[in-house]
Image (cartoon, rainbow, N blue to C red):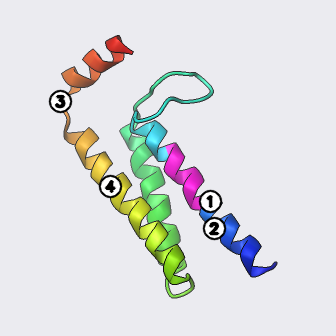
Amino acid sequence: MEDEKLNQLFYSLVYSFQMQTWMSLGKIKNPVSDKVEKDLQAAQMTIDIIDMIKEKTKNNLSEQESNFIEQVLADLKLNYVHESTRPESSTEEEKKEN
């Protein structure tokens, strides 16, 4: 496979896990149910998968790809911590507003 196609596939793979995590964190709507759903266990799983991809591709990524996956992980982990330490009552109130 040509390098450009491989690069695009890599970005697409990481991006798809990123979007799945945003949905699991309740940050974006699930396009299937058209609802905001929060599942922190699923969010942790997809973050772990991205972390595994980062480790398995170590020393085999361009600087740009490495920076991309690092930034994605940093954003997701910060948001995961925020959502997991957030009082449940705030989340319930937001669900009622949506």
User: How many angstroms separate mark 3 from mark 4 (CA)?
Assistant: 18 Å
The numbered mark, 3 or 4, whose residue comes first in the sequence reads 4
Is residue 18 on the magenta stretch?
A: yes
Identity of the amino acid at label 1? Leu
Instruction: Choose mark 3 or mark 2, whichever is in front.
Output: 2
Q: In this figure, which residue is indicated by the disc labeled 2?
A: 10
Q: Is disc 2 in contact with disc 1, using a CB cutoff of under 8 Å?
A: yes
The magenta-colored residue range is 13-20
Identity of the amino acid at label 2? Phe
Give the crowd class for mark 2: few <14, some 14-19, many >=20 residues within 10 Å.
Answer: some
Is the residue 93 above or below the residue 1 in the image?
Answer: above
Q: In this figure, which residue is indicated by the disc labeled 4?
A: 77
Q: Nearer the viewer, residue 9 or 41?
A: 9
Q: Position of residue 29 (x, y in %)?
A: 50, 29
Identity of the amino acid at label 4? Lys
Q: Position of residue 69 (x, y in %)?
A: 47, 67
Q: Secondary structure at mark 1?
A: helix
User: How many angstroms separate mark 3 from mark 2 (CA)?
Assistant: 36 Å
Q: Secondary structure at mark 3?
A: loop
Q: Residue at x 63, y 67 (%)?
A: 10
Q: Secondary structure at mark 4?
A: helix
Q: Nearer the viewer, residue 16 or 56?
A: 16
Identity of the amino acid at label 3? Pro
Q: In this figure, which residue is indicated by the disc labeled 1?
A: 13
The numbered mark, 4 or 2, whose residue comes first in the sequence reads 2
Kindly identify which numbered label has been placed on residue 87: 3
